[in-house]
Image (tube, rainbow, N blue to C red):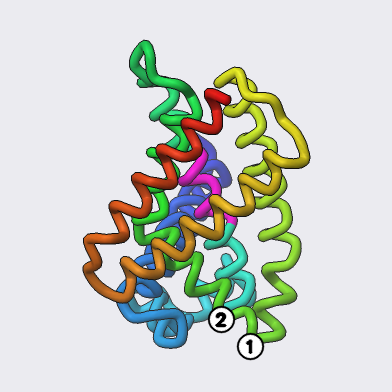
Amino acid sequence: MSDDTGRARQSRLTRAQVLQSAIQRIHEAGYTQASLIDIARHDGLSKSALLHHFPSRAALMAEVIAECWRRNKSGILKALDARPDGISAIQVFATEIWHQFRQPHNLAEIEILIASRSDAELRSALALTAQESDSEARVFYRQVRTASGMENSEHSEAVYTQGLAILRGLAMELALGENPQVEIAASIWIRALCERALE
């Protein structure tokens, strides 16, 4: 293996480690407490080493948003591959996306999105990444609908947007503390989405 290949591999590993640490620190301490220094210290890196991979905190947070989508899609694809006979793709999708929204990466994403309301640099950095992730997620959702025998229409885009808002809201409820009604509400949403697929 050439030295350049080894360095490139190490760079990818370090980058992935920084992303994981950023997600973990945001999840544990909140967005405002997850500074570059805090994240670098958590990884045993210097701030300058972290800045080599991410030129600013806003750039790191934009990459966290992209990583969230990658993790969500990976989880959904694995769940779809393991789908038992008789279970629709939309049911697997809905169940798995709720599972993903309960994970630290999605809770971190919600914190970052909320922080972007009052942080112009962050909002600017997120603009393209969030738009690309949302666009890819919508295409993926349409593919799952098609696999479930559901038609795609303007209405299905509204259902996607509604589902995303519901899941983010329920995930925020979980972040605020234990609430048994959250799981019940998620089950109702999953059932309603599946029933809609049968209409």
Q: Which residue is mark 1?
A: 118
Q: Is residue 69 magenta?
A: yes
Count residues near mark 2 (Cα–Cα under 10 Å), then give few for <14, some for 14-19, many for 20+.
some
| First to last magenta residue range | 66-73
* Residue drawn at x 55%, y 77% as measured from the top left: 114
Percent position (x, y) of residue 50? 50, 72
Amino acid under label 1? Answer: Ser
Structural crowding at the residue carrying mark 1, measured as other residues with C-alpha within 10 Å and reported as few (<14), some (14–19) or many (≥20): few
Q: Residue at (69%, 76%) from the top-left corner?
A: 123
Q: Does the rendering let one see residue 99?
A: no
Give the spatial CA distance, label 1 vs label 2: 6 Å
Residue 185 at x, y = what percent? 36, 54
- Please tell me in which quadrant of the rendered image residue 118 appears: bottom right
Q: Which residue is mark 2?
A: 115
Labels 1 and 2 touching (C-beta < 8 A): yes
Residue located 61% across and 66% down the image:
62
Residue 40 position (above or below residue 9): below
- Residue 160 is labelled as none
Q: Is residue 191 magenta?
A: no
Of residues 76 and 145, which is closer to you in this image? 145
The one of 164 and 140 positioned closer to us in this rendering = 164
Q: Secondary structure at mark 2?
A: helix
Q: For the residue labelled by badge 1, is the local secondary structure a helix, a strand or a loop?
A: loop
